Amino acid sequence: MRRLLEFVLTLMVTVSSIAITQCRVTSTYAATDGARIVGERWLNTREVDLSVASPALGRTGRVRLLLPAGWSRSAHRSWPVLWLLHGGFDDYTAWTVKGNAARLTAASGAIVVMPEGGRCGWYSNWWNHGHGGPPKWETFHLTEVRQLLERGYHAGTRRAIAGPSMGGFGAMAYAARHPGMFHAAGSFSGADDIRYGLIPPVVLGVNVLAGCGEIDWQRIWGSPSAQRDVWRAHNPSDLADRLRGVHLYVSCGSGLRGPYDTARLPDPLEAATYLVAKSFAGRLADRGIPATVHFYRGTHSWSYWQRELTAALPQLLS
């Protein structure tokens, strides 16, 4: 009987510990607009998911963190921060589930931040026909999440940012729209020139329709012609001069079969993105803005984006 009671007590303590680890709530600090962390779920000793009550989104947003060795809540120091943005149709878990980010960044010495960006969010405060309002992804990331991490998780002010596809656009757009916030930026198969002919509006429309079930894709930046100033204000290529001094990494596949592909047919999405990425790289070169550029045979897929992150990490973390 004694052994049975000891077993039951041990089991209760273990279950209680797991519950605390999985559901800990932290709300003693807030962002300037009132955003708060309302949930903290530890997946292991390094990986933690946050739930953020976000006025910018009008709902709860999610963020996954990878914390560096030696991190503790009671530390009297800060750590550099690497933001990894996800692409369209993906979510905040993509870099750990598909991109092997935990292993690739294990020795980085940085807090790795992987925020929810919406399946078709495009890392922007949506124009919404001139009315603004949610979703305000840019505010969610660069005001709310940034401040909460600085105030509660020892995130420092040395920052780098990278992402694939829609996330590659987000990385370059954020770095250009907020000069000095990011010291390095990487775009893998990113739509970095959203005013390059008809390709970006078509890709945007398909992404919004298929990813969010939203027919009105012009809610994001309006019409490419009538609201051209809004498009320019979000276009990394138009904002290229603001990227001067940022360590840049730009890569994209041609859409043709590469070393990680089994299908023989070309990938039309990567082929279209290739033209857009080449346009952006050309703009940087024309403006005399240094960048590491890598164009290769390959498709729009995580196998290549893992490889590109591996290649870009020394520059991002330098």
Image (cartoon, grey):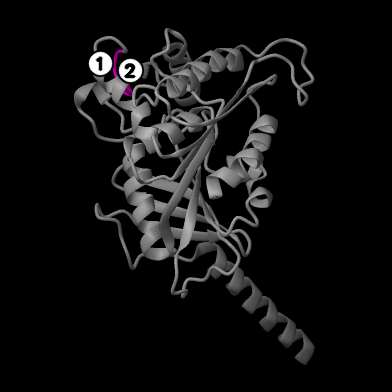
Tag 1's secondary structure? Answer: loop
Query: What quarter of the picture does the N terminus occupy?
Result: bottom right
Marks 2 and 1, how far apart at CA? 10 Å
Residue assigned mark 2: 218
Tag 2's secondary structure? Answer: helix
Q: Is residue 263 within the magenta segment?
A: no
Where residue 278 sits in the image (x, y, percent)?
Answer: 52, 17
Q: Main secondary structure of the magenta part?
A: loop
Q: Quadrant of residue 263?
A: top right
Residue assigned mark 1: 227
Q: Residue at x 41, y 31 (%)?
A: 121
The amino acid marked with disc number 1 is Gln
Where residue 306 sits in the image (x, y, percent)?
Answer: 66, 37
Q: Is residue 156 above or below residue 162?
A: below
Q: Is residue 221 within the magenta segment?
A: yes
On screen, residue 22 versus residue 132, left or right, reads right
| Foreground pick, 74 / 20 | 74
Q: Can residue 11 be spotted in the picture? A: yes
Q: Residue at x 53, y 27 (%)?
A: 165
- Which of pointers 2 and 1 lies earlier in the amino acid sequence? 2
The amino acid marked with disc number 2 is Gln
Q: Can residue 98 be spotted in the picture? A: no
| Foreground pick, 21 / 170 | 170
Q: Are marks 2 and 1 in contact (CB under 8 Å)?
A: yes
Please report the bounds of the magenta region as a residue range. 219-223
On screen, residue 75 versus residue 43, left or right, reads left
Where residue 82 sits in the image (x, y, percent)?
Answer: 50, 49
| Foreground pick, 218 / 1 | 218
Q: Quadrant of residue 132?
A: top left
Where residue 136 sits in the image (x, y, percent)?
Answer: 32, 37
In the picture as drawn, the residue positioned furthest to the bottom comes out as: 2
Q: Quadrant of residue 301?
A: top right
